[in-house]
Amino acid sequence: MAAAPSSAELLQLVLEACAELLPAEILKTALQSPKDGLHVSAGMAHGDYVTRLPHSLFCRLRAAGHGAQDGPGVEYTVVSPLGLERAHRFDTSAQLAEAIARAMPERARRIVADARPTATGRLRLTTVHHLQWHLQHGRLFCAACGQFFLGGTGLRNHHLVKHGREYEEAMGEVQAAKFPLILAPGP
Protein backbone atom coordinates (compact mmCIF):
# COMPACT_ATOMS: atom_id res chain seq x y z
CA MET A 1 0.00 0.00 0.00
CA ALA A 2 1.23 3.51 -0.79
CA ALA A 3 2.56 5.58 2.07
CA ALA A 4 0.22 8.27 3.36
CA PRO A 5 1.30 11.69 2.08
CA SER A 6 1.73 14.52 4.53
CA SER A 7 -0.89 17.27 4.58
CA ALA A 8 1.94 19.77 3.90
CA GLU A 9 2.84 17.89 0.71
CA LEU A 10 -0.79 17.89 -0.44
CA LEU A 11 -1.24 21.56 0.39
CA GLN A 12 1.88 22.40 -1.63
CA LEU A 13 0.31 20.72 -4.68
CA VAL A 14 -2.87 22.78 -4.23
CA LEU A 15 -0.85 25.99 -3.90
CA GLU A 16 1.12 25.18 -7.07
CA ALA A 17 -2.17 24.79 -8.93
CA CYS A 18 -3.36 28.12 -7.49
CA ALA A 19 -0.15 29.77 -8.73
CA GLU A 20 -1.09 28.76 -12.28
CA LEU A 21 -4.50 30.41 -12.04
CA LEU A 22 -4.39 33.39 -9.70
CA PRO A 23 -2.89 36.88 -9.72
CA ALA A 24 0.22 37.13 -7.53
CA GLU A 25 -1.37 39.67 -5.17
CA ILE A 26 -4.23 37.25 -4.42
CA LEU A 27 -1.94 34.24 -4.13
CA LYS A 28 0.03 36.09 -1.44
CA THR A 29 -3.13 36.12 0.70
CA ALA A 30 -3.55 32.34 0.53
CA LEU A 31 -3.59 30.65 3.91
CA GLN A 32 -4.09 33.88 5.86
CA SER A 33 -6.65 32.01 7.91
CA PRO A 34 -5.97 28.59 9.46
CA LYS A 35 -9.41 27.59 8.16
CA ASP A 36 -8.02 27.83 4.60
CA GLY A 37 -5.51 25.03 5.17
CA LEU A 38 -5.95 21.37 4.44
CA HIS A 39 -8.09 19.49 6.95
CA VAL A 40 -8.93 15.84 7.47
CA SER A 41 -12.43 15.15 6.15
CA ALA A 42 -15.15 14.18 8.57
CA GLY A 43 -16.48 10.71 7.89
CA MET A 44 -15.17 7.91 5.72
CA ALA A 45 -17.59 8.14 2.79
CA HIS A 46 -15.64 10.88 0.95
CA GLY A 47 -12.05 11.87 0.28
CA ASP A 48 -9.64 12.08 3.18
CA TYR A 49 -8.82 15.82 2.96
CA VAL A 50 -10.76 19.01 2.29
CA THR A 51 -9.83 22.69 2.01
CA ARG A 52 -11.97 25.79 1.73
CA LEU A 53 -9.09 27.70 0.11
CA PRO A 54 -10.80 28.02 -3.33
CA HIS A 55 -13.85 29.67 -1.76
CA SER A 56 -11.70 32.03 0.30
CA LEU A 57 -9.63 33.00 -2.75
CA PHE A 58 -12.80 33.59 -4.77
CA CYS A 59 -14.05 35.98 -2.05
CA ARG A 60 -10.66 37.73 -1.97
CA LEU A 61 -10.76 38.16 -5.76
CA ARG A 62 -14.15 39.87 -5.48
CA ALA A 63 -12.97 42.06 -2.60
CA ALA A 64 -9.87 43.07 -4.60
CA GLY A 65 -12.04 44.44 -7.41
CA HIS A 66 -11.93 41.46 -9.78
CA GLY A 67 -15.71 41.04 -9.74
CA ALA A 68 -17.33 40.31 -13.08
CA GLN A 69 -19.12 43.24 -14.68
CA ASP A 70 -22.23 41.23 -15.48
CA GLY A 71 -22.78 39.06 -12.42
CA PRO A 72 -21.56 37.59 -9.17
CA GLY A 73 -18.46 35.91 -10.60
CA VAL A 74 -14.86 37.02 -10.96
CA GLU A 75 -12.75 37.77 -14.02
CA TYR A 76 -9.11 38.69 -14.30
CA THR A 77 -5.99 38.20 -16.40
CA VAL A 78 -2.82 36.47 -15.27
CA VAL A 79 0.51 37.07 -17.01
CA SER A 80 2.94 34.12 -17.03
CA PRO A 81 6.69 34.55 -16.47
CA LEU A 82 7.06 34.28 -20.27
CA GLY A 83 4.60 37.12 -20.84
CA LEU A 84 1.64 34.98 -21.93
CA GLU A 85 -1.67 36.51 -20.84
CA ARG A 86 -4.48 34.22 -19.73
CA ALA A 87 -7.95 35.54 -19.03
CA HIS A 88 -9.96 33.68 -16.40
CA ARG A 89 -13.62 33.89 -15.46
CA PHE A 90 -15.33 31.93 -12.72
CA ASP A 91 -19.00 32.42 -11.93
CA THR A 92 -18.81 30.50 -8.64
CA SER A 93 -16.21 29.40 -6.13
CA ALA A 94 -17.00 25.81 -7.15
CA GLN A 95 -15.81 26.62 -10.69
CA LEU A 96 -12.57 28.01 -9.27
CA ALA A 97 -12.16 24.85 -7.15
CA GLU A 98 -12.67 22.72 -10.27
CA ALA A 99 -10.03 24.72 -12.16
CA ILE A 100 -7.59 24.30 -9.26
CA ALA A 101 -8.20 20.53 -9.29
CA ARG A 102 -7.46 20.42 -13.05
CA ALA A 103 -4.33 22.59 -12.67
CA MET A 104 -2.64 20.38 -10.09
CA PRO A 105 0.86 19.40 -11.23
CA GLU A 106 1.41 16.08 -13.00
CA ARG A 107 3.31 14.62 -10.04
CA ALA A 108 0.12 14.93 -7.97
CA ARG A 109 -1.24 11.89 -9.79
CA ARG A 110 1.12 9.69 -7.79
CA ILE A 111 -0.45 10.67 -4.47
CA VAL A 112 -3.87 12.16 -5.28
CA ALA A 113 -6.36 9.66 -6.70
CA ASP A 114 -9.19 12.20 -6.97
CA ALA A 115 -9.59 15.96 -6.56
CA ARG A 116 -13.06 17.43 -6.93
CA PRO A 117 -14.93 20.59 -5.97
CA THR A 118 -17.92 20.69 -3.69
CA ALA A 119 -20.97 22.85 -4.39
CA THR A 120 -19.76 25.29 -1.72
CA GLY A 121 -16.37 25.89 -3.36
CA ARG A 122 -14.29 23.58 -1.25
CA LEU A 123 -11.77 21.18 -2.76
CA ARG A 124 -11.99 17.55 -1.62
CA LEU A 125 -8.91 15.34 -2.11
CA THR A 126 -8.79 11.55 -2.05
CA THR A 127 -5.25 10.26 -1.71
CA VAL A 128 -4.04 7.05 -3.32
CA HIS A 129 -3.37 5.77 0.21
CA HIS A 130 -7.00 6.43 1.23
CA LEU A 131 -8.33 4.80 -1.95
CA GLN A 132 -6.19 1.70 -1.41
CA TRP A 133 -7.34 1.44 2.21
CA HIS A 134 -10.99 1.48 1.11
CA LEU A 135 -10.34 -1.11 -1.60
CA GLN A 136 -8.66 -3.42 0.92
CA HIS A 137 -11.75 -3.14 3.13
CA GLY A 138 -14.20 -3.97 0.32
CA ARG A 139 -15.35 -0.40 -0.34
CA LEU A 140 -15.61 0.85 -3.89
CA PHE A 141 -15.14 4.41 -5.17
CA CYS A 142 -17.86 6.16 -7.20
CA ALA A 143 -16.02 8.05 -9.93
CA ALA A 144 -19.13 10.15 -10.58
CA CYS A 145 -19.41 11.75 -7.12
CA GLY A 146 -16.36 10.71 -5.10
CA GLN A 147 -18.11 8.66 -2.40
CA PHE A 148 -17.21 5.16 -1.20
CA PHE A 149 -19.70 2.28 -0.97
CA LEU A 150 -19.53 -1.17 0.56
CA GLY A 151 -19.09 -3.77 -2.17
CA GLY A 152 -20.39 -4.04 -5.67
CA THR A 153 -24.04 -4.15 -4.62
CA GLY A 154 -23.74 -0.88 -2.69
CA LEU A 155 -22.05 0.89 -5.60
CA ARG A 156 -24.43 -0.60 -8.16
CA ASN A 157 -27.50 0.51 -6.19
CA HIS A 158 -25.97 3.95 -5.72
CA HIS A 159 -25.49 4.33 -9.49
CA LEU A 160 -29.02 3.13 -10.18
CA VAL A 161 -30.67 5.48 -7.66
CA LYS A 162 -28.43 8.53 -7.33
CA HIS A 163 -27.01 8.77 -10.86
CA GLY A 164 -29.98 7.29 -12.76
CA ARG A 165 -27.88 4.74 -14.63
CA GLU A 166 -29.24 1.66 -16.35
CA TYR A 167 -28.36 -1.69 -14.81
CA GLU A 168 -25.68 -2.55 -17.39
CA GLU A 169 -24.03 0.86 -16.99
CA ALA A 170 -24.08 0.52 -13.21
CA MET A 171 -22.44 -2.90 -13.43
CA GLY A 172 -19.78 -1.43 -15.72
CA GLU A 173 -19.05 1.21 -13.09
CA VAL A 174 -18.73 -1.52 -10.46
CA GLN A 175 -16.23 -3.42 -12.60
CA ALA A 176 -14.21 -0.24 -13.22
CA ALA A 177 -14.19 0.54 -9.48
CA LYS A 178 -12.98 -2.94 -8.57
CA PHE A 179 -9.86 -2.52 -10.70
CA PRO A 180 -8.85 1.16 -10.60
CA LEU A 181 -5.71 2.35 -12.35
CA ILE A 182 -3.30 3.58 -9.70
CA LEU A 183 0.09 4.87 -10.75
CA ALA A 184 2.94 2.87 -9.27
CA PRO A 185 5.55 4.81 -7.32
CA GLY A 186 8.39 5.95 -9.54
CA PRO A 187 12.13 5.68 -8.98
Image (cartoon, rainbow, N blue to C red):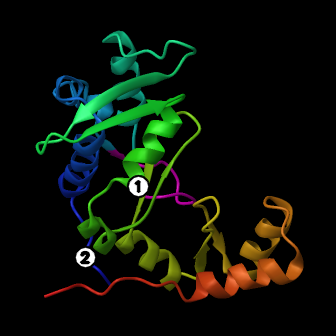
| Vertical position of residue 15 compared to residue 150: above or below | above
- Looking at the picture, how far across and down is residue 5, in whole percent? 24, 65
158 vs 131, left or right, is: right
Residue, disc 2: 3
First of labels 1, 2 by sequence position: 2
- Looking at the picture, how far across and down is residue 132, in whole percent? 43, 79
Local packing at callout 2 (Cα closer than 10 Å; few below 14, some 14-19, many 20+) is few
Residue sitting nearer the eye, 46 or 56:
56
Query: Does the segment drawn in magenta span residue 123?
Result: no
Tally of marks? 2
Residue sitting nearer the eye, 153 or 75:
75
Specify start and end residues of the magenta stretch as a single range: 39-49
Q: Is residue 106 visible?
A: yes
Residue 4: give its label.
Answer: none
Camera-near label (1 vs 2) is 1
Identified at 48% across, 31% down, the residue is: 90
17 vs 143, left or right, is: left
Q: Secondary structure at mark 1?
A: helix
- Looking at the picture, how far across and down is residue 10, in whole percent? 25, 56
Q: Is residue 123 visible?
A: no
Q: Amino acid at mark 2?
A: Ala
Q: Are marks 1 and 2 in contact (CB under 8 Å)?
A: no
| Vertical position of residue 114 compared to residue 72: above or below | below
Residue 102: give its label.
Answer: 1
